[in-house]
Amino acid sequence: MSRWVLGEFGAPDRLVAAARALRTRGFRRMDAHSPFPVEEVDAVLDLPPSRLPLIALIAGVGGAVGAYVVQWFTQAVDWPLNVGGRPLHSGPAFIPITFESGVLAAASAIFMGVIGACGLPRVTHPFLRLEAFRSASIDGFWIAIEVEEARRDEVEGALRELGANVVLAVEEVP
Amino acid sequence: MSEPLPLAPVPEDPLVVHPLLEERRTDARLGEALLRPVLTTPGPGWWALVGLCAALTVLLIVAITVTLVTGVGTWGNNIPVAWAFGIINFVWWIGIGHAGTLISAILLLFGMKWRSSVNRMAEAMTLFALTCAALFPLLHLGRPWKFYYLFPYPSSLRMWPQFRSPLTWDVVAVTTYLTVSVLFWYLGMLPDLATARDTARQSWRRRVWGLLSLGWRGSARHWRHWRTGYLLLAGLATPLVVSVHTIVSFDFAVSQLPGWHSTVFPPYFVAGAIFSGLAMVLSLLVPARRALQLHAVVTDAHLDALARLLLVSGLFVAYGYVQEHFFGWYSGDPYEMHAMSILRTGPYAPAFWLVFTCNVLVPQLFWSARLRTMPVVLWCAALLVNVGMWMERFIIIVSPLSEDFLPSSWRHYAPTWVDLSLLSGTLGLFGLGFLLFLRFLPPVPISEVKALQHELAASEAFARAVSAREGGGR
């Protein structure tokens, strides 16, 4: 069972300042929630770079190679068909489909990758049950800290001290 | 940040003529204003337009039914004009789609800030245009229910598609383009669907948008992956735009027909696609801006930028015409010369000169800075360009086919009511899709406009600070 304490800070720069302060106080399991990306907070939270480019590259190259192999196999090996005397293995004619299939595979991998890396779809996340947390997609800048029951009061105190407008606690009901 | 920022005037940037956002609002007010179209009940104007588009869509269904029941013989196609409205409409619609991807992907890669307010509508336009485009090759197959023959699947007939044929390339290109456009559009919309979910008051709306937003919570981790993914998709969509219309042009260019067999076709088609797409963006954006009261976020800066793009792509298209006719003459080939001369003086001359007027002369209006920001002028010019681009596709496809090598096989073309119904029907379907989109999904990217507003505020504060310091030092 996970527990979180959430605090709302009203503006992006206050969110970054609060995150930095919490980090110096030794809190590690933190996340920020905002209606639009706040770049500075990534550095404060020490987020690792996304691995999506690598996934996209692998999927793209795989899709392209797969498409080329399918075209070569069907046209030159499995069912050789002489069309106007053109070579059976006509490389240049296979390029358009190879390129398009590579793009299709890479794009699908990126989309699935973003959804997967974000842990979506999850429409029943405990945060979404909080009425006040609705502001996270409108004008609220939230910090969420994952805590043990014993440290809950300490974290709530820290958030209030840093000037949070709202402090809430939520736990995941299994 | 202990000292308050000095309130010296912001130095004016001579290159910025119109502001990107007309006014500053709080994040909550901004979000509400941008969501107003989907949260309020629609007015009578919307219903009237929906009624009109629905009627045209019914006409489309009738025309499709006639085509399926009786066959492609109900179209005006003949031999030698075996390709006509089916392919004209396909090329025209798919070209319109390209500007959506251009605005959303290429401008994102180039860091153009003005795209934020218009990209969602442009992408929606792309999707509906592609849906309309995809209908035509399918119906043109003759036996559309056997469309799956076009995909390589291991069938007991041991029959594979013919991968050396540009028409098979089309299938892959269009399928890829449609899929990537949908993914790009939906991924870009996730944060705004969450905003809509959290702003809505009725529980059914919350549920629907809650499901569509997949539980987006705007966490720093979400944003990080989202931004990387969105940028990567933009990077992939950019060469895709160019490749798709290049492949469409290969349908013509790899043939032996005079007037089609030309190396200028790929860039010429891509330029025409972007040109017609920008015209369609303007034809939709100008009325939508007025109806939805989006003047604060879709400002004169956006109209100005779109008009400039229209002018530039119009010049590319004009260059394409010059090249086409020059090479027709320079080839010295009597068949090529004939294919070009029937455009200038022959049976297709009225269509050609209409194309020339709409696509070459009309965009020249936008050399004038004043005309670039006049919505009425822009809208009329955009509609004329749409007509011109459709006619251009018509003369490219029909004129070389109808008068090729042997005068004994020449025959001209006239559309039937089924052809005309298919064209107007897809216009209805396109309009219906766009109207429903404006009602049910956030039409302007809310999170991007909020981020833009904060960015502009920060840069203004910085400029003020700098000018205050310089003023104090002197």
Image (spheres, helix red, strand yellow):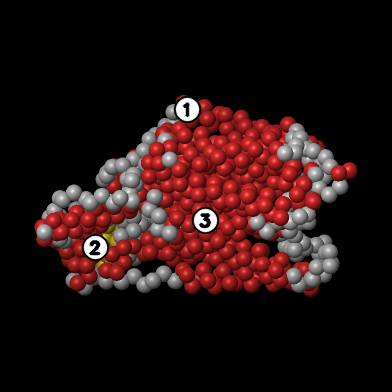
Disc sitting over residue B371 in the figure: none
Residue B148 visible in the snapshot: no
| Residue in front for this viewpoint, B462 or B357 | B357
Disc sitting over residue A16 in the figure: 2
* Residue at the disc numbered 3: B183
Judge the density around disc 1: few (<14), some (14-19), many (≥20) Cα neighbours within 10 Å. few
Quadrant of the rendered image containing residue A29: bottom left
| Residue in front for this viewpoint, A47 or B372 | B372
**Contact (Cβ within 8 Å) of mark 2 with mark 3:** no
- Dot 2 falls on which chain? A
Residue located at (70% from left, 46% from top)? B396
The quadrant the C terminus of chain A occupies is bottom left
Secondary structure category for the residue under label 3: helix
| Above/below status of A128 relative to B225 | above
* Residue at the disc numbered 1: B45
The quadrant the N terminus of chain A occupies is bottom left
